[in-house]
C-alpha cells in the first residue's frame, strides 16, 4: 500500500523538478538572414572551467538545433580577438563593435553570462537539485544595437535523478533557442 502511494508522488516530484523557465525581451522575431555570420563570445562566469563548459554546450546546441546558421566557434572568436588585441568591455559599446567587425568578420555577436551553476547532490537528507540560469543577448555588429535577450533557468532533477550542470545547460539552451524562431530555424527548409 505504501509503495502505491510513494511511486506517484515520486513521479510527480521528478516531473516538477525538470521544469524550465524562459523569458525573452527585445524582438525575438527580428529577421536574421540565414547567411549571416554569428560569433559566439565565451559566456561570463567567475570559474573559467565552468564558463568554458557552458560556452561549449551553447555552441553544440547552435550547431545541432539551428539549421543553416553560420556560427563562428568560440575558440576561433577568441583567437581572432587576441590577435587583434581586443578586450571585451563590461558593457559592449560602439568602439568594441567597430574593432570586433574588422577582426572577427561577423555580422552578429551572441554573448551572455551564467547566473547560476549548481550541481545537485544525491545524498539524503540534504539532496539538492541541479540548477542552471543563463542570460544570452544577440547584438547587430553594424549598428551595435541589442536585438534580443533571453534569460532562462532549468533544474536537472534532484537526488539520484540529478543531471550534471552541463547536461542541464544543454537542455536549457535547446529550450531557449526554440523561443527564437527567426534566429534558430530548426525545421526543414521553407518552415
Image: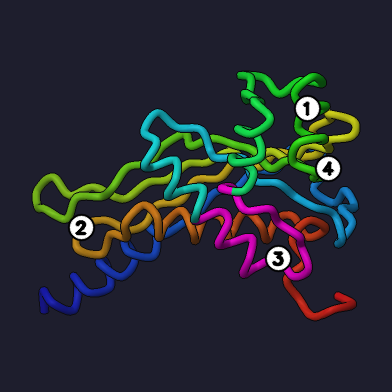
Circle 4 sits on which residue?
A: 27
Identify the element where label 4 is drawn: loop
Percent of width and height locating residue 97: 79, 28
Asked whether disc 3 touches disc 2, contact meaning CB atoms under 8 Å apart, the reply is no
Q: Which one is nearer the viewer's eye here, 41 or 190?
A: 41
Percent of width and height locating residue 48: 40, 36
Mark 1 vs mark 2, CA separation in Å? 47 Å
* Mark closer to the chain start, 3 or 2: 3
Circle 2 sits on which residue?
A: 159
Quadrant assignment, res 99: top right
Percent of width and height locating residue 109: 73, 40
Mark 3 vs mark 2, CA separation in Å? 33 Å
The residue shown at (59%, 47%) is 74
Task: Provide the residue span drawn in magenta.
Answer: 57-75
| Viewer-side label of 1, 3 | 1
Identify the element where label 1 is drawn: helix
Circle 1 sits on which residue?
A: 99
| In magenta segment, residue 62 | yes
| In magenta segment, residue 64 | yes
Q: Residues within 10 Å of mark 4 (few under 14, many from 20)?
A: few
Amino acid at each position: 500500500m505504501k509503495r502505491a502511494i510513494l511511486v506517484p508522488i515520486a513521479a510527480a516530484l521528478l516531473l516538477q523538478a525538470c521544469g524550465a523557465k524562459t523569458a525573452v525581451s527585445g524582438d525575438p522575431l527580428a529577421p536574421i538572414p540565414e547567411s549571416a555570420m554569428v560569433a559566439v563570445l565565451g559566456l561570463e562566469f567567475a570559474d573559467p572551467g565552468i564558463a568554458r563548459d557552458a560556452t561549449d554546450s551553447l555552441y553544440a546546441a547552435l550547431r545541432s538545433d539551428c539549421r543553416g546558421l553560420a556560427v563562428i566557434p568560440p575558440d576561433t572568436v577568441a583567437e581572432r580577438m587576441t590577435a587583434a588585441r581586443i578586450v571585451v568591455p563590461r558593457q559592449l559599446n560602439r568602439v568594441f563593435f567597430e574593432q570586433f567587425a574588422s577582426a572577427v568578420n561577423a555580422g552578429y555577436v551572441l554573448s551572455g553570462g551564467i547566473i547560476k551553476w549548481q550541481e545537485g547532490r544525491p545524498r539524503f537528507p540534504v539532496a539538492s537539485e541541479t540548477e542552471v540560469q543563463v542570460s544570452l543577448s544577440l547584438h547587430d555588429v553594424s549598428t551595435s544595437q541589442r536585438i534580443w535577450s533571453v534569460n532562462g533557468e532549468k533544474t536537472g532533477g534532484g537526488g539520484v535523478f540529478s543531471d550534471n550542470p552541463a547536461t542541464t545547460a544543454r537542455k536549457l539552451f535547446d529550450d531557449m533557442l526554440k523561443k527564437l524562431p527567426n534566429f534558430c530555424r530548426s525545421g526543414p527548409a521553407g518552415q
